[in-house]
Image: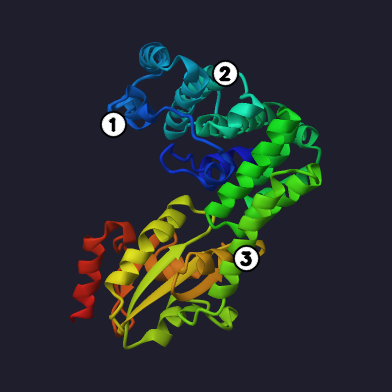
Amino acid sequence: MKGFFLLLLFCFPKTIFSQQAMPLSVQKLIKRNEDPVLFKDARLLVNSLFEKGFHRWSKDSIINRMLPAVWKERDSIAGLYPGKKKNIQYYYANKISAFSNGIKSKPQRGEAWKVLADTVLKAMPLPEINLLSYSPSANLFLENYVENELTELFLQAREQGELLIEKKLGLPIDTIKKRAEKYGEIFLSIIYARAILPEKLYERYLANQTLDRTGDLELVKSQVIFDQLIKEFPGSRLRNVCKREIGSLEADLSKSTGNKNIVFIKNPDSIRSLDSLIAPYKGKVVYLDIWGTWCIPCVAEMSRHTKPLKDHFRNATQLVFLYLAMENPGNIEKWKEFVLLHNVTGNHIYKTDKEIEPFWIGLLNTKDVPRAYPAYAIFDRNGKLVTSQAYRPSNGEALYKQIESVLDE
């Protein structure tokens, strides 16, 4: 499992928030946002790197042509806001970091994304603690810095062996892997951050991560990070705001538990094939969503696009939304939590990676086709498969028409 950790970072990267998105940590911990309003200007070169096609450039062109142009713009803006030089530098570093994440390809040194990330993140000093109270950009830089250092550690481990990770994180390698599988890359980040950040910055980093995960409705993860905050800083002045937000999320979860429109299928072990999964809904049209909480595109589809889909079909009593999740048994709490907190109405069942294979074979009628998540399918009232390549919720009207055509039969 030498590549386990790099695979984790590449498949499940942290979501890089935009400056406009205002994560919960910024809303709750920033006293006054002193980042220049100009940052929102879409005409800035640094705000349109993908739109201008720089991701298609060669490594040499990105490093030797694009980056100098971005720095020139940064320095020009810094001249307009001389008192905000550090804010501006962190903003630009974050944007380049996000661009680097967007062009990640092979997990190895020498690739454009790695050279770019190192060039930017290693050249900037860590933010001063006072700046974190006024600059969202400085807070985001802290997160990007930790992520880049963690990636560097895993590249070194691939070259030197995984015992290096055990040494740096101070835990047995098996423990690290089990917790990483359960909680994702954030567990690795909060442990390694302790070794690479000054004490005050580490405290702020933990508080930021607690609140941002709470804002993303990830209760289990936010609790894990908060526990680390209390363990390391029992008298932290940031603990109350974190505790309050977690409590609010726990209350939301408690309310959602009684939602009769969210059904966790009973006796799931008795359902071992696609036919047995669809059979109870004969007489109705079924929209099947195959997903997993570990799958970033799956989560994005559910959290952003499921509500409009349900709103559109709110009066369609002959339509069933069925969700088949592929989950590790250790993630069942996280799976239920996600469904409840995101109000994913419908019928839900989970299977392990081995248990779900017969369902894929039933859907695709072959063992040889790659299993791509998320996947969507539509079944007619007789339980017959109409399409194994249905549109996603984010396709909006195209999906609505696809479902309506089956409902109208």
Amino acid identity at mark 1? Glu
Tell me the tag on residue 98.
none
When the figure is inspected, residue 353 is found, relative to residue 264, above or below; the finding is above
Secondary structure beneath label 3: helix
Quarter of the figure with residue 121: top right
Secondary structure beneath label 2: loop
The answer to whether mark 3 and mark 2 are in CB contact below 8 A is no
Choose the circle earlier in sequence order: 3 or 1. Answer: 1
Left or right, 143 with reference to 406: right
Tell me the tag on residue 250.
3
Amino acid identity at mark 2? Met
The answer to whether mark 3 and mark 1 are in CB contact below 8 A is no
Tell me the tag on residue 51.
1
Of 409 and 116, nearer the camera is 116
Residue at 71% x, 29% y is 197
Say few, some or many: other residues with alpha carbon within 10 Å of mark 1 (under 14 / 14 to 19 / 20 or more).
Answer: few
Q: Which residue is mark 2?
A: 124
